[in-house]
Amino acid sequence: MEIEVLEGLSAWFSGYVQTFKTGDFDADRNIILKEGHTARVRREIREFGESLGLPGEDLRLAEAASLLHDVGRFPQYALYKTFSDRRSCDHAAFSVQVLRDEGVLDDLDPRERDLIVKVVSYHNRASIPQEEPDGRCIFFSKLLRDADKLDVWSLLLDYYHRRACEGYRNEALELDLPDGPEISEEVCRSLLAGEIVKVKDLFSQNDFKLLQASWIFDLNFRPALVAVRDRGYLKRTRERLPRSEEVNRIFELLESRLEERIKAERTQGPD
Ligand SMILES: [Fe+2]
């Protein structure tokens, strides 16, 4: 992707986000939150791409996908006042719809357009569809899924800290799940089996925190795994959960699986 094309998409994005702002900080806080998330995912994906040795045109393509991945979040929040896809709509499909309705990708090279649409639509799925035949699409999807998870995890850890220290609340970041000491049986089972926790098994805030911890099984690239370790995400997540034998057991397993994965992963570029 050429620099001018990425700059054009960036200008469109900034203008689009502005249309959802009222000028009232409280009313706009979740729009600003997703705007900040997008900017950080873009920075993160660029850094991951650079450490994997991607050429400039692929770095810009990855940045474009990250810039556009959550555009559906803005109308989703405006319409439904929630970020819970279960209670509203699939926000990735909504992002694709916005891109089509607004003609955002109309002037792009058709191969880049098709790739961005697929990468955006796959970013929030439980997994990339097995039948996807395009190696480049799979590579860029993995990259976006890693960068996205890293920032969502960090954003939620910061939120849990603020909530505990300042009593700050934002229901949109709690996916409307109740708070309580419980951890669901199925969530524990998934973690101890080395599997990602399923959204359908979430019944509490603790379950949601454990879903984030299970992302170590779903990260693809070494730089993302190293970032999780160096930023202490597992330790910080554990601090926000009840102290129990079960939680200890889960986190001992997760810490050792993270180390194993860091050792095992080889860096790899697109086909
Ligand atoms: Fe998203």
Image: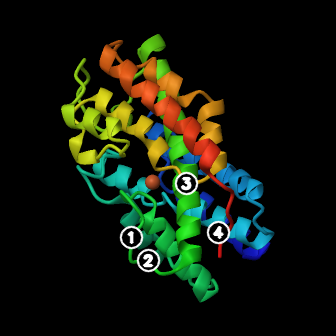
The residue lying toward the viewer, choosing from 139 and 11, is: 139
Question: Along the polypeptide, which appears first: circle 1 or circle 4?
Answer: 4
Q: Amino acid at mark 3?
A: Asn
Q: Residues within 10 Å of mark 3 (few under 14, many from 20)?
A: many
Q: N-terminal of the two: label 2 or label 3?
A: 2
Badge 3 marks a residue whose secondary structure is loop
- Mark 1 closeness class: few <14, some 14–19, many ≥20 residues within 10 Å: few
User: Where 30 falls versus 109 (above or below)?
Assistant: above
Which circle, 4 or 2, is nearer the viewer?
Answer: 2
User: Which residue is denoted by mark 1 in the rendering?
Assistant: 129
Do labels 2 and 1 touch, CB within 8 Å?
yes
The answer to whether one can see residue 39 in this image is: no
Residue 9's disc is 4
Q: Quadrant of the N terminus?
A: bottom right
**Residue shown at 69%/50% (left/top)?**
43
Residue 237 % position (x, y): 46, 25
Report which quarter residue 27 is drawn in: top left
The residue located at (58%, 50%) in the rendering is 147
Name the residue tied to disc 2: 132
Q: CA distance from mark 4 to mark 3?
A: 27 Å
Per the model, the C-alpha gap separating discs 2 and 1 is 6 Å
At x 54% / y 61%, what residue is drawn? 142
Q: Which mark is residue 220?
A: 3
